Image: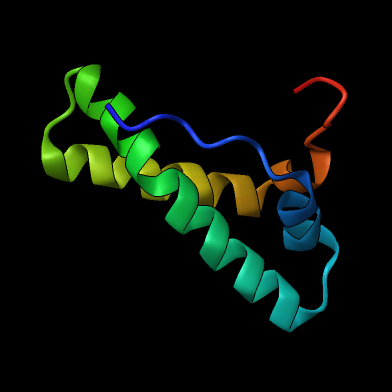
Amino acid sequence: MQQFPQTRWTLIRRVSEGTPEEVKQALDELCRSYWYPLYAIARMKGAGPEEAADYVQGFFAHGLANGLFAKADSDRG
């Protein structure tokens, strides 16, 4: 399995605090960095390919809709 990327806190902050263009770029980079590792975890847990992709998409949608990126705390990891 591909190693989970190290958390890039500046990128996460830009998703919740940046200008609209910074938010778009940061979100794109965040999704590209974490999509496959999250997908691989879902597959290891028994999800089929389409179901795993849906889970990952749902994770990002939930995070955006509920402001979870803004609530992320680098002190807690």
Q: Nearer the viewer, residue 44 or 61?
A: 44
Evaluate whether residue 67 shows in this view: no
- Taking the image as shown, residue 65 lies to the left or right of residue 14, namely left
Q: Residue furthest bottom?
A: 21
Q: Nearer the viewer, residue 34 or 57?
A: 34
What residue is rendered at 61% in x and 45% in y? 63
What residue is rendered at 47% in x and 41% in y? 59
Marker count (numbered): 0
**Quarter of the picture holding the N terminus:** top left
What residue is rendered at 81% in x and 20% in y? 76
User: Which percent across, then down, holds residue 29?
Assistant: 54, 62
- Taking the image as shown, residue 61 lies to the left or right of residue 70, namely left
User: Which percent across, then down, holds residue 32?
Assistant: 44, 57
Location of residue 20 by image quarter: bottom right
- Taking the image as shown, residue 56 lies to the left or right of residue 29, namely left
> What sort of colour scheme is used for the picture?
rainbow
Q: Is residue 14 above or below residue 71?
A: below
Q: Is residue 29 above or below residue 62?
A: below
User: Which percent across, then down, holds residue 13?
Assistant: 81, 53
Q: Residue furthest left?
A: 48
Evaluate whether residue 14 shows in this view: yes
Q: Is residue 76 above or below residue 50?
A: above
**Quarter of the picture holding the C terminus:** top right
User: Which percent across, then down, holds residue 31?
Assistant: 48, 55
What residue is rendered at 82% in x and 78% in y? 19
Location of residue 52 by image quarter: top left
